[in-house]
Amino acid sequence: MWTAAAPSLPAGRAGLTVTSLMVAAGPEPAVLALLDPDSDLAEALLDSGRAVVSLLRWDDRAMAEAFAGSAPAPGGPFRMAPFVDTPWGPRPEHAPAWAGVELLDHRETGWSVLVTCRLAEVEVGEDDDPLGHRRGRWQRLSPP
């Protein structure tokens, strides 16, 4: 899930469930992702140049659906869990792994906008029940 501070938006922050991303290893590691160009998250990232990329847990399926816009979230998806403000934007307090990213480049690719972001900070914690997405379905990536 990607989140960003968005002072120009009424809620002040934006988020989007993103399942198309890649980490490019190397001396200058980067994250590449395909975002919906009409999403509030794309607007916030292009405006601020910063975002948080959080890996979710199996129990976060409802929140992932809400941030994807495919499930209801009374009061908005940011009310589904506590969030902590970081220099890159809000992150779920319970996220076992997350990264603060800074926008390097963006361009339209197909029906999406391809963003390339520099990994500015990475925190990796214990993740005993990670959430995955494959062929349109949520997958439990570890044995129950």
Image (cartoon, helix red, strand yellow):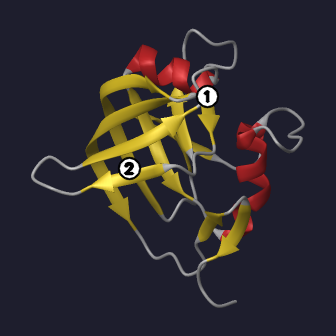
Considering every residue shown, the one lying at the far bottom of the view is: 143
Q: Which residue is mark 2?
A: 99
Seen from the viewer's position, the closer of residues 19 and 80 is 19
For label 1, the SS is strand
Q: Position of residue 95 (x, y in %)?
A: 54, 59
Residue 131 is left or right of residue 23, and the answer is right
Q: Position of residue 23 (x, y in %)?
A: 33, 54
**Residue 98 locus on image (x, y percent):** 43, 54
Describe the element under mark 2 as helix, strand or loop.
strand
Three-letter amino acid code at the position of disc 2: Ala
* Residue at point 78%, 44% (across, down): 66
Kindly identify the residue that appears in the image at 50 percent across and 52 percent down: 54
Can you say which quadrant of the picture contains the C terminus? bottom right
Circle nearer the N terminus (2, 1)? 1
Label 2 environment density (alpha carbons within 10 Å; few <14, some 14–19, many ≥20): many
- Residue that label 1 marks: 14
Q: Amino acid at mark 1?
A: Ala
Would you identify the image quadrant in which residue 12 lies?
top right
Q: What residue is rendered at 43% in x and 32% in y?
A: 114
